[in-house]
Amino acid sequence: MAATRRDTDAMRALRGLEDGRSSVRLRAALAAGTSPDPRFVGKLVERCASEPEFFVRDMLTWALTRHPVALTLPELLREVRSERARARSQALHTLSKIGDRRAWPAITWALLSDADDEVARSAWRAAVVLVPDGEKSALATMLAKQLGRGGQETRLSLSQALVALGDVIVPALCAAATASGPHVRAHALATQRLLRDPDAGFESAVEEAKRVVALAGAPRTDDENRADR
């Protein structure tokens, strides 16, 4: 009788994940995480790739974290190679929540530099969670190559990922701070400030960095030129 009840509940949850109403899908994802079942894993991963509602995707990720890693990891590693951007992004997000470092080799340069900002941001967050200690410097160098990319939200995500790596990012930031592109220099300087003062607001750090870059590129006056002679 108990097995029959579990089967009935599992079938109801699986059907619910396909329902056209987001509230039903949310309840189904909650049920799948509350009572984990191997039958849910494939459907949860599949639903992540197409779910349009953020709060439902978040519940799907939670439900996956409630299942054994031996079941979820192979499915998610396949998804990060998907042609669908949402599939890649959500799989990376879920890997960051699971935190199993066996997934680290899947965090490739192609993902860290993905043309889709959401995928790249998810890759950055996953990378700083999964990276082995001995590879943090190399990761910092790779992430620094993305400085200056995208809008404010994307740049904040990158700065947060870099700062999460700690002081190993200093050489990469120093190199970027002398780059030729003003957007790259400003982003590097803003990230340096956040590393020194994590409580500093990113927007104010960016504005201060822009002023520094602008002043550094301003024409020198005759008095300044004579002072250097």
Image: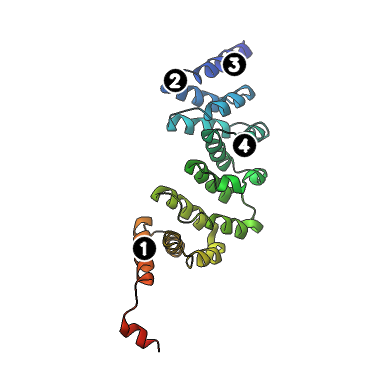
Q: Where residue 194 sits: x, y (%)?
A: 43, 61
> 10 Å neighbourhood of mark 2: few (<14), some, or many (≥20)?
some
Alpha carbons under labels 3 and 1: distance apart: 59 Å
Nearest-to-viewer mark from 3 and 4: 4
Q: How is the image coloured?
A: rainbow
Alpha carbons under labels 3 and 4: distance apart: 33 Å
**Which residue is the site of mark 3?**
6
Disc 2 residue type?
Val
**Which residue is the site of mark 2?**
24
Alpha carbons under labels 2 and 1: distance apart: 47 Å
Disc 3 residue type?
Arg
Alpha carbons under labels 2 and 4: distance apart: 29 Å
* Chain-order first, disc 4 or disc 1: 4
* Tag 2 secondary structure: helix
* Chain-order first, disc 2 or disc 1: 2
Do labels 2 and 4 touch, CB within 8 Å?
no
Q: Where residue 38 sits: x, y (%)?
A: 64, 24
* Tag 3 secondary structure: helix
Q: Where residue 142 sits: x, y (%)?
A: 58, 55
* Chain-order first, disc 3 or disc 4: 3
Q: Is residue 175 above or below residue 228?
A: above
Q: How many labels, in total?
A: 4
**Which residue is the site of mark 4?**
81
Given residues 176 and 77, the one toward you in this image is 176
> 10 Å neighbourhood of mark 3: few (<14), some, or many (≥20)?
few
